[in-house]
Image (cartoon, rainbow, N blue to C red):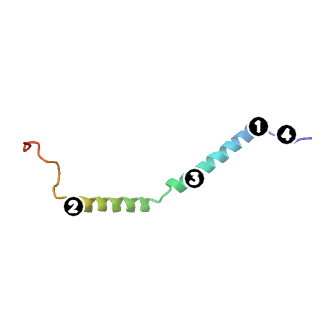
Amino acid sequence: MAEIINLRQVRKAKARAAEDAKAEENRIAFGRPKKVKTLQQRRKALEIDRHEGHRLERGEPDSDSSP
């Protein structure tokens, strides 16, 4: 005789396994420690400041002095 299975439980177990797999992928893709995130933000800010520091003109040109 065959083993009796509950289809609802099997369906839920399959859904749980799929969610766990998706969560593992997200941990790899988005899971960075806060220290790493802040370090990257600081480096980007420093890079932007250095880049902006080399501009010849700063800010927007005055609209009053337009010809």
Quadrant (top left/top right/bottom left/bottom right) for the N terminus? top right
Q: Nearer the viewer, mark 3 or mark 4?
A: 3
Q: Which residue is mark 1?
A: 7
Q: Residue at x 29, y 58 (%)?
A: 48
Q: Nearer the viewer, mark 4 or mark 2?
A: 2
Which quadrant of the figure has residue 9? top right
Q: Nearer the viewer, mark 1 or mark 3?
A: 3
Asked whether, in this view, residue 43 is left or right of residue 65, the answer is right
Q: Earlier in the sequence, mark 3 or mark 4?
A: 4
Q: Position of residue 63 (x, y in %)?
A: 11, 42
Quadrant (top left/top right/bottom left/bottom right) for the C terminus? top left
Q: Which residue is mark 2?
A: 53
Q: Residues within 10 Å of mark 3 (few under 14, many from 20)?
A: few
Return the residue nearer the eye: 35 or 64.
64
Q: CA distance from mark 2 to mark 1?
A: 66 Å
Q: Position of residue 55 (x, y in %)?
A: 20, 58
**Cβ–Cβ under 8 Å for marks 1 and 3:** no
Which amino acid does the dot numbered 1 rest on? Leu
Which amino acid does the dot numbered 3 rest on? Glu
Q: CA distance from mark 4 to mark 1?
A: 9 Å
Which amino acid does the dot numbered 4 rest on? Ile
Q: Nearer the viewer, mark 2 or mark 3?
A: 2
**Residue 25: mark in rendering:** 3
Which residue extends farthest front? Answer: 67
Q: Which residue is mark 4?
A: 4
Q: Residue at x 43, y 62 (%)?
A: 36
